[in-house]
Image (tube, rainbow, N blue to C red):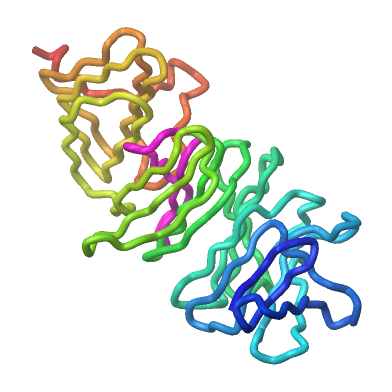
Amino acid sequence: VLFAGYSKLYISQNRGDDWDSVYLSIPGYYIPANWAIATCPTVPGKIYCAGITSDELHSGIYKVTDITSYPFTATDISYGLFLSGQKITGIAVNPNNSNDLYITIGGFTSDKKVFHSTNAGVNWDNITGSLPNLPVNCAVYFGDVIYIGTDIGVYVRDGSSTDWTPFYNGLPRVPVTEMHHVVRDSIDYIEISTFGRGLWQSEIYEPCTAVLQVDAALQGQQFFQAGAILNSTSVISGGRGTNVNFQAGSYIYLTPGFNAVSGTDFKAYLAPCNSGVPLRPADPAATVPVKNELKKR
């Protein structure tokens, strides 16, 4: 079975020898799929797609309930999104529940980046949270965690989170164009393609621990968080372009050996795990206190 996404969605049941297009309940009104297509692992006959028609009069996200029964018909599940022309860039379906799906949105509308539905698109929840006002280009769902690729790297959100968390340690903080979950040598990875920086992989997201020790030499874009205490003896170098963020629920200890070299950008915050994208406090006087053992000694 093959799918092709144009201003119409085409389906082939015989490896491309024949193709049929998919329409809504009104004959002659065909659905587009030139933005995104997602299959459902638990229901092979069900797919979701998103796109815009060739005349650009209609756009949105659609559900095809059964591709095994011809003629194929689809349902428009865009109602409640109120996207006003914003492009749907990605669809991620829960591999264990075909009714649980996420969509990502491109463009620069600040409050419309990611939407979630638990009932196959009947209702949608806006879970944009504190994401920066940049395009979100793709998504993948695995292990109760939704991963999204934005124009400045990867962010994650698990089932217990109230907001998004940066996930770019060891990954370039550049536009992410596609993402996949793969298993290699019994290890789960998230693989990404980027605009201008090639292909990358990272082991999957791990939940925030109560206490975290960070001792590695750090360069580039890095984010570390702990539920209660974060300790570090790291040397932060790399000059301009290095941006390292520490976040902990109660204390951050910078102990002997820690050094942020001149020209790098280092910030520390007190905040709960997975509580949103860290931002510099607007009022310098309100900056979170960091316990620096170097000063005490």
Of 70 and 297, the residue lying toward us: 70
Relative side of 91 to 41, left or right:
right
* Residue 162 inside the magenta-drawn segment: yes
Report the quarter where the C terminus lies.
top left
Q: Position of residue 110 (x, y in %)?
A: 67, 40
Of 230 and 38, the residue lying toward us: 38
Of 189 and 70, the residue lying toward us: 70
- Which region is colored magenta? 152-173
Which residue of the protein is positioned furthest toward the front in this rendering? 17
Relative side of 209 to 27, left or right:
left
Count how many numbered circles sit on residues in the image. Answer: 0
Of 194 and 17, the residue lying toward us: 17
Q: Position of residue 132 (x, y in %)?
A: 57, 37
Residue at x 18% of width, y 30% of height: 216
Residue at x 43% of width, y 50% of height: 156
Instruction: Check the image and report above or below for 159 versus 133.
Output: below
Instruction: Check the image and report above or below for 240 versus 187.
Output: above
Report the quarter where the N terminus lies.
bottom right
Q: Position of residue 262 (x, y in %)?
A: 31, 8
* Residue 83 inside the magenta-drawn segment: no
Q: Position of residue 27 (x, y in %)?
A: 90, 82
Instruction: Check the image and report above or below for 117 versus 238.
Output: below
Name the image quarter holding residue 103: bottom right
Which residue of the protein is positioned furthest toward the bottom in this rendering? 69
Instruction: State the predominant SS element of the stretch in magenta.
Output: loop
Residue at x 56% of width, y 72% of height: 39
Residue at x 70% of width, y 64% of height: 5
